[in-house]
């Protein structure tokens, strides 16, 4: 049986998003001291995880609708695998042996979230999607007041990001692409992305106060005192803004094949492996770049972009594809369908 032809747009988008994940994690090493890295962090985190999660929702339809618990459980196995990779990196480079299976503040959380999102959607799909969306958003708006939610079972992030996953699940890909690829919409999308870039450049200090909202794992009490009571309104604004930016990304993503396009089908392995290389960079390479350039130099950001690209490419070779495909879809061909 031949493979169903993949859609280049989605693989291009996935590759771009995994590259931004890597670049965002690199930039975060320097955010305490570098305003340029704070700008990069704000730009990337304003949309990259919502877009990643929305895309995951788009492609979970078959898994959810057929109640493919084998694949859903594989997300938990993936989570444990990434936890082990992350633990090895911390042990090798920082001699940190701490390990907590069901609590996570770093990279592995996303795999566990996919496990939870899929199970939640199997339950919620029996209800009117409009009611589910409203309920999930309202729950997230008020969850920020609960200081007990956090890294345990990744509950805060799961609640805060679930609306994006469910939105992806209920959206029809073809109906979504058609209007977004109209020229006027593409022009507007370009203007919006340029406006976002201008905002993070000229309003970096004020916008960086909103960092706790962008990561999705923090209660409102981590915001500045004058912003705590505005938490629900700020999160609602974040939802609306990120949703618009996701549409802009899809609108501006090319629909043709590039040399990197096939790597967009391997974002799972790239996400799993990159945490090790990020730790290696922070431990072995970072100081050799920051010392000669200085934390205040824009060249630090300029150099990090190709480094992030190299790490992304190193995590995306075809040689790693089979073991990760077997992990997620044992006995099947996961590339055989866009669903």
Image (tube, grey):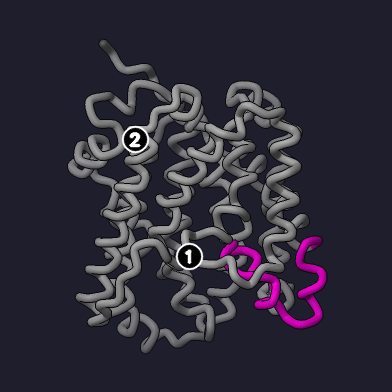
Residue on which the image places disc 2 = 262
Q: Which residues are magenta?
A: 210-233
139 w.r.t. 144: above or below:
above
The mark lying in front, picked from 1 and 2, is 1
Residue 33 is left or right of residue 86, and the answer is: right
Residue visible at 20% across and 75% down in the picture: 92
Residue visible at 36% across and 36% down in the picture: 265
Residue 272 is left or right of residue 256, and the answer is: left
Which label number is shown at residue 152?
1
Asked whether 170 or 145 is in front, the reply is 145
Q: CA distance from mark 1 to mark 2?
A: 35 Å
Residue visible at 74% across and 60% down in the picture: 142
| Secondary-structure class at tag 2 | helix
Q: Position of residue 41 (x, y in %)?
A: 56, 67
**CB within 8 Å, label 1 to label 2:** no
Residue visible at 53% across and 83% down in the picture: 32
The answer to whether any part of residue 284 appears in the image is no
Earlier in the chain: of badge 1 and badge 2, it is 1
The answer to whether any part of residue 207 appears in the image is yes
Asked whether 32 or 218 is in front, the reply is 218
Residue 226 is left or right of residue 37, and the answer is: right
Please state, as top left, top right, bottom left or bottom right, where the N terminus lies in the image. Answer: top left
Q: Position of residue 71 (x, y in %)?
A: 35, 34
Q: Position of residue 312 (x, y in %)?
A: 34, 54
Q: Position of residue 43 (x, y in %)?
A: 61, 62
């Amino acid at each position: 049986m031949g493979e169903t032809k993949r859609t280049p747009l989605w693989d291009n988008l996935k590759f771009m998003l995994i590259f931004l994940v890597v670049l965002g994690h690199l930039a975060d090493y320097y955010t305490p001291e570098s305003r340029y890295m704070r700008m990069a962090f704000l730009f990337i985190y304003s949309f990259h995880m919502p877009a990643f999660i929305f895309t995951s929702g788009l492609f979970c339809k078959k898994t959810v609708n057929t109640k493919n618990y084998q694949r859903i459980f594989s997300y938990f196995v993936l989570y444990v695998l990434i936890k082990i990779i992350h633990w090895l990196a911390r042990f090798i480079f920082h001699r940190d042996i701490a390990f907590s299976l069901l609590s996570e503040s770093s990279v592995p959380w996303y795999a566990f979230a996919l496990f939870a999102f899929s199970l939640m959607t199997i339950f919620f799909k029996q209800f009117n999607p409009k009611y589910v969306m409203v309920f999930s958003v309202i729950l997230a708006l008020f969850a920020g007041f609960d200081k007990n939610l956090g890294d345990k079972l990744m509950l805060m992030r799961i609640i805060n990001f679930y609306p994006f996953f469910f939105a992806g699940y209920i959206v029809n890909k073809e109906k979504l692409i058609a209007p977004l690829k109209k020229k006027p919409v593409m022009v507007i999308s370009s203007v919006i992305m340029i406006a976002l870039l201008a905002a993070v450049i000229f309003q970096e200090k004020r916008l960086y106060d909103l960092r706790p909202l962008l990561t999705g794992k923090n209660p409102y009490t981590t915001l500045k005192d004058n912003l705590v009571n505005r938490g629900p309104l700020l999160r609602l604004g974040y939802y609306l803004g990120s949703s618009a930016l996701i549409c802009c990304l899809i609108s501006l993503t090319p629909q043709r094949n590039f040399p990197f396009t096939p790597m967009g089908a391997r974002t799972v392995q790239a996400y799993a492996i990159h945490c090790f290389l990020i730790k290696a960079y922070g431990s072995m390479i970072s100081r050799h770049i920051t010392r000669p350039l200085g934390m205040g130099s824009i060249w630090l950001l300029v150099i990090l972009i190709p480094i992030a690209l190299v790490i992304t490419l190193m995590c995306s070779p075809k040689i790693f594809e089979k073991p990760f495909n077997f992990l997620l879809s044992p006995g099947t061909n996961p590339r055989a369908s866009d669903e």
